[in-house]
């Protein structure tokens, strides 16, 4: 699965910690968008989609959250609770986010602007697209 944990550099001194993230170095793409999710109530599950082309790095900068990443072949549950760690998620990976702690702030770095057309929100359709693969021009038939 095109998913991996990235450990960011951290500068720690008596004044606290600082974690820098640079595009094409610590994040493996150009960062075109940043957003964050917080104030998620207990029991809420978000996501339930894949992206066709978008790459992202998810960082839980406060608290903790669990991420389910899934393809038709395999799935994995990852706990994010370390602000020095990011979860890279490549294109065509189903994701769900759940078990947000009360103080959770999930920061996301994204490789593109917000594009509704890049979302696949139906799991059956997603699995079908994975099965059929990309055509020669690199696109997926929808
Ligand atoms: C993802 C996971 C990890 C915008 O207007 N601009 C944005 O850049 C984003 C990300 C969202 N929105 C709007 C669209 C919806 O009206 O914010 C609302 C909530 O978005 P959504 O339901 O897609 O949120 P999640 O938590 O299910 O998914 C988000 C990202 O959308 C998605 O790309 O991978 O976080």
Image: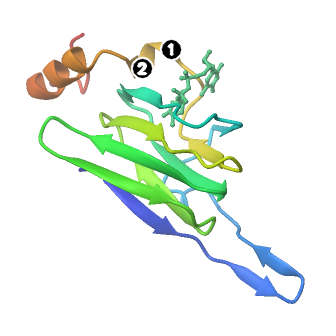
Q: Is residue 72 left or right of residue 61?
A: left
Mark 1–mark 2 CB contact (< 8 Å): yes
Query: Where residue 11 appears, x then y in whole percent?
Result: 74, 81
> Which element type, helix, strand or loop, lies under badge 1?
helix
The image's mark for residue 99 is: none
Name the residue tied to disc 1.
116
Q: Residue furthest front?
A: 42
**Rendering quarter of residue 123:** top left
The residues tagged by marks 1 and 2 sit, at their Cα atoms, a distance apart of 6 Å
Query: Where residue 115 appears, x then y in whole percent?
Result: 53, 18
Q: Residues within 10 Å of mark 2 (few under 14, many from 20)?
A: some
Mark 2 beta carbon near ligand 1 (under 8 Å) = yes
* Quadrant position of ligand 1: top right
Q: Residue at left 83%, top 79%?
A: 16
Q: Residue at left 70%, top 67%?
A: 20
Q: Is residue 6 left or right of residue 140?
A: right
Above-or-below relation of 77 to 115: below
Query: Where residue 40 appears, x then y in whole percent?
Result: 64, 35
């Amino acid at each position: 699965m095109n998913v991996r944990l990235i450990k960011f550099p951290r500068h720690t001194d008596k004044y606290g910690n600082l974690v820098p993230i640079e595009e094409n170095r610590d994040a493996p793409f150009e960062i075109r968008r940043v957003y964050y999710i917080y104030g998620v109530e207990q029991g809420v599950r978000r996501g339930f989609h894949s992206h066709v082309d978008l790459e992202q790095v998810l960082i839980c900068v406060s608290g903790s959250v669990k991420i389910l990443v899934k393809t038709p072949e395999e799935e994995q549950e990852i706990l994010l609770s370390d602000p020095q760690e990011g979860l890279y998620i490549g294109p065509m990976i189903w994701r769900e986010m759940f078990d947000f702690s009360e103080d959770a702030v999930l920061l996301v770095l994204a490789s593109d602007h917000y594009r509704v057309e890049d979302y696949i929100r139906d799991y059956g359709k997603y699995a079908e697209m994975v099965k059929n693969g990309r055509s020669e021009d690199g696109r997926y038939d929808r």
